[in-house]
Amino acid sequence: MLFWKKDMDGNISVFLGKRKHGVDKGRWSLPGGGWEYGDGLAADGSRNYHRTALRESREETGYEIPEQDDVTRIWSIHIPFFHFEVFDYRMRELNALFILDTDEFSEGKWFSITALPDSLEWFVPLQIHNLEKKLVRREKLKDVILVSTRF
C-alpha cells in the first residue's frame, strides 16, 4: 500500500517503513504482504488483492483506512508463480497515527517524493512514479471535464 498525502503547497509525501528482516532488511519499503485465504475472491473469481492490501496495511501500520473505495490499484505484474499488485491511498487525516508492526519494521517515516532515502526496496521508486502518472492523468481529466462543462 502506497500511503500518500499532499500538503497545502501541493508537495507530495509517502509513508515508508524500514524492514527488519529478510533480503530487504534495512531498506525502506511500502507496507504489504501476501494474499491469504481469508482475503477471499473478487467478483471474477480471482484472488481479492484489494482486500489483501487493506488487511496488510492495517496489520503493518495499525491504520484502518476509512474510505476503502478510495484505495486504487496503481500497478500489477503477473509472471509464472508470482503475482504482485500495489495500491495507493491518499491520506485525508494528515495527522493520522500509524502504529507500526515492530516485527516487520524498525521505524516508519513520511518522506517527500523529492527527498527519498537512498536505501529503498527496488520497486518503491517505480511505485512513486506510477503514483505521479496517476495524478497527472487525474489533473488532465479534470481539465477536460472543466473545458467540456464550459460549452
Image (spheres, rainbow, N blue to C red):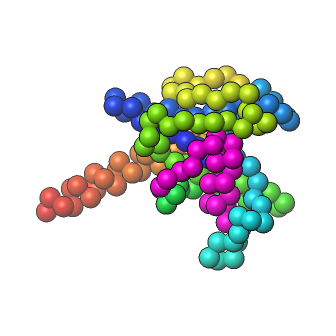
Quarter occupied by residue 37: bottom right
Q: Label the magenta part by its dominant secondary structure.
A: helix
Range shown magenta = 48-67
**96 or 85, which lies in front?**
96
Is residue 120 visible in the rendered image? The answer is no
Q: How far from the left and from the top, in percent, is residue 18?
A: 71, 29
Q: How far from the left and from the top, in percent, is residue 20?
A: 80, 31
Quarter occupied by residue 127: top right
**107 or 22, which lies in front?**
107
- At a point 76% along the width and 54% down the height, the residue shown is 34
In the shown orientation, is residue 83 left or right of residue 85? right
Q: How far from the left and from the top, in percent, is residue 137?
A: 41, 50
- At a point 47% along the width and 49% down the height, the residue shown is 134
- At a point 66% along the width and 54% down the height, the residue shown is 55
Extreme left residue here? 151
Residue 79 magenta:
no
Q: Is residue 148 above or below residue 89?
A: below
- At a point 86% along the width and 35% down the height, the residue shown is 22
Extreme bottom residue here? 44
In the shown orientation, is residue 8 left or right of residue 115? left
Is residue 148 visible in the rendered image? The answer is yes
Count of numbered labels shown in the rendering: 0
Q: How far from the left and from the top, in percent, is residue 42?
A: 64, 72
Quarter occupied by residue 151: bottom left
